Amino acid sequence: MPSNKYALFRYRIIDKLISNKYKPYPSKEDLRNACEDELYGIGSERIFDSTIEKDLWAMRNESLLGYNAPIKYSKLEKVISTKTQIIVSVKYH
C-alpha cells in the first residue's frame, strides 16, 4: 500500500493518543513510535518526524479533510488538543 494511503491510519492513531485523558500531551516522538508500531510492527519500518509534523499540519489546516483539529504545541514540544475525539470514526473496507 502506498505511504500516502497510510495517512488516514496515522490520523486515527494520532487522534487516539491526543484524546487519551490518562496520558495527555504526547510528544512527537510518542506519536511517531505509536504509528510505527501499529502500522509496521515493532522494530520494522521507520516514519520520519517530518511525516508526523505534516500529519499534524493537515489535521489542523486541511479543510478538505474536514478535521480542523485544534492541535497546538507546548514549549516542551508536547502536542495539546483543546477538544477530545477530534476525528470521527471511519469504516475501512
Image: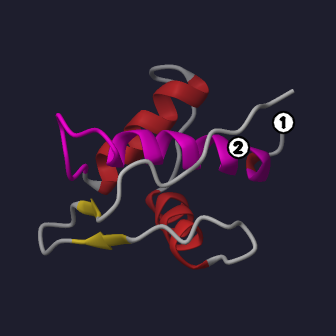
Q: Estimate how packed mark 2 is, as few (under 14), some (14 to 19) or many (20 or more) residues with alpha carbons within 10 Å.
A: few
Q: Amino acid at mark 1?
A: Met
Q: Amino acid at mark 2?
A: Tyr
Question: Does 54 lie within the magenta span?
Answer: no
Coloring basis for residues: secondary structure
Report the residue marked by disc 2. Answer: 6
The stretch of residues the image draws in magenta is 4-26
Question: Image point 21% across, 61% down: which residue?
Answer: 78
Tell me the number on the disc at residue 1: 1
Residue 75 shown left or right of residue 16 in the figure: left
Question: Image point 34% across, 60% down: which residue?
Answer: 83
Q: Nearer the viewer, residue 32 or 16?
A: 16
Question: Does 7 lie within the magenta span?
Answer: yes
Tell me the number on the disc at residue 31: none
Q: Position of residue 62 (x, y in %)?
A: 65, 76
What's the distance in space between the residues labelled 1 and 2, CA to CA? 8 Å
Q: Estimate how packed mark 1 is, as few (under 14), some (14 to 19) or many (20 or more) residues with alpha carbons within 10 Å.
A: few
Please say if the residues under marks 1 and 2 sit with CB atoms less than 8 Å apart: yes
